[in-house]
Amino acid sequence: MICIACPGQGSQAPGFLEPWLDIPVFKQQIEKASDVLGVDLIHFGTVADADAIRDTKVAQPLIVAAGIASYLTLTERFGESLKVSAAAGHSVGEITAAFVSGIFDADNALKFVQRRGNEMAAAAALTPSSMAAVVGGELDTVVSHLESVGLFAANYNGSGQVVAAGSKEAIANLVASPPAGTRVVALQVAGAFHTSFMEPAKPALEAFSKQLNVKNPEISIWSNRSGELVDSGQDFLELMVNQVSNPVRWDKTMDSMQSANVSVMIELLPAGALSGIAKRAMPNTVAIALKTPADLDKVAEAIGK
C-alpha cells in the first residue's frame, strides 16, 4: 500500500525548487500556481532567503504549490504503475493531501492555502508567538511541563517529538531551560500555530471556505486531527478550517498508516521531516523523501518500475 505524505510549514528551505525546474510538468505547474496566487513562486523557491520564505503568507502557498507540482511529476513519470491508496498531510500539508485525494482541484487548493496563510499571519501579528520542537522525554511528562509553563503541545509528531507553541518569551525560556532528558530546537515559524493564538484566523477562513467547491475523496485520506479516515470532502474542509487552532496528531496518523499496512510512504516537496520521523516510528515502511529529482529513482525501485 502506497501513501502520499505532505509536509507542513517549516519544511521549506532556500532554493529547494531549483533542481526540479528542469522538469517541464513541474515548472509548468509552478508557473500556473504563480498566476493563480499572483506571487512569483519561482523567485521564492530559488533565490529568496530563509527570512523571506519564513513569512507565513509566503511559506504556506509555496509549500502546497511545490507539493502539488511534485505529485503531478510523480503521476506523469509513473502513470498507473503508481498505485496510491492513501494520503495524509501535516498541518498545511493537509491541503496538498486534499488535492492528492481529489477533494480539491489545484486552483481551489491554492486559493484556500493563500487565504489560510494570510489569516494565520494576521492572527500571529496580534501577539508575538512562536514554536519549538521538544525531542526526547516521556510524552505525558513533557506535555505536563509545557502546560505548567504556559505553553501548548501543538504537534504530536510521534517518535519522541512534541512541538510546543506559545508566547515568544515562553518559547525562549523553554529553549534556554529544556525539560530534563530532552533537547529543544526553536522552529522557523512566525506564530503559535495550532493553538488558541490562531482563533482570530478562523471566522474569515470559514467564510471563505464556503465559496470553494469540494468533492468526496477518491483516495483515502487521514485527518491529522484524529488520525481517522474522512470520507466526506465537506467534512474534511471543515476539519481543515478548525485545524488552525487544534493540535496536529501526526502520531495518530502514523498509527493509522501502520494499521493499514502502508508499505511505502512517499513524502512530497519540501520533503525530509515526515520521512525522517517515519523511519524511526514506522520501521517496516519504506519512507522516501522527494528532495531532488534523483529521488524519483528511489520511488521506481520501491514500486518495482
Image: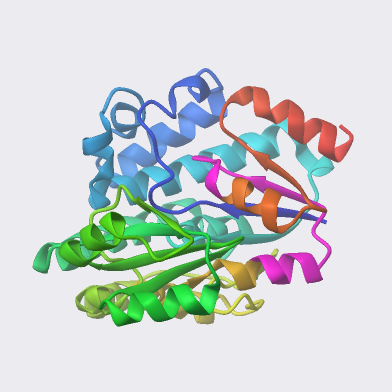
Colour mode? rainbow
Q: Nearer the viewer, residue 261 or 46?
A: 261
Q: Is residue 238 above or below residue 294?
A: below
Mark count: 0
Left or right, residue 114 beside residue 103: left
Q: Kindly tell me whether residue 245 is visible in this rendering.
A: no
**Residue furthest front as drawn:** 180
Q: Residue, x 63% and y 47% (percent of image)?
A: 275
> Which portion, as a residue range, is magenta?
254-273
Left or right, residue 94 beside residue 258: left
Question: Which quarter of the figure is the C terminus placed in?
Answer: top right
Q: Residue, x 54% and y 23% (percent of image)?
A: 24
Q: Is residue 204 above or below residue 14?
A: below
Q: Nearer the viewer, residue 47 or 144?
A: 144
Q: Nearer the viewer, residue 78 or 183?
A: 183
**Residue furthest top as drawn:** 22
Q: Residue, x 44% and y 28% (percent of image)?
A: 17
Task: Provide residue 123's location: percent of width, then percent of height.
Answer: 17, 68
Task: Provide residue 44's location: percent of width, then percent of height.
Answer: 30, 32
Task: Provide residue 274's location: percent of width, then percent of height.
Answer: 58, 51
Q: Kindly tell me whether residue 42 is visible in this rendering.
A: yes
Q: Is residue 214 above or below residue 235?
A: above
The answer to whether residue 265 is magenta is: yes
Q: Quadrant of residue 163?
A: bottom left
The answer to whether residue 130 is magenta is: no
Task: Provide residue 295's location: percent of width, then percent of height.
Answer: 67, 28
Left or right, residue 304 beside residue 60: right
Question: Which quarter of the figure is the N terminus placed in?
Answer: bottom right
**Residue furthest left as drawn:** 126
**Residue furthest right as drawn:** 304
Q: Residue, x 63% and y 73% (percent of image)?
A: 252
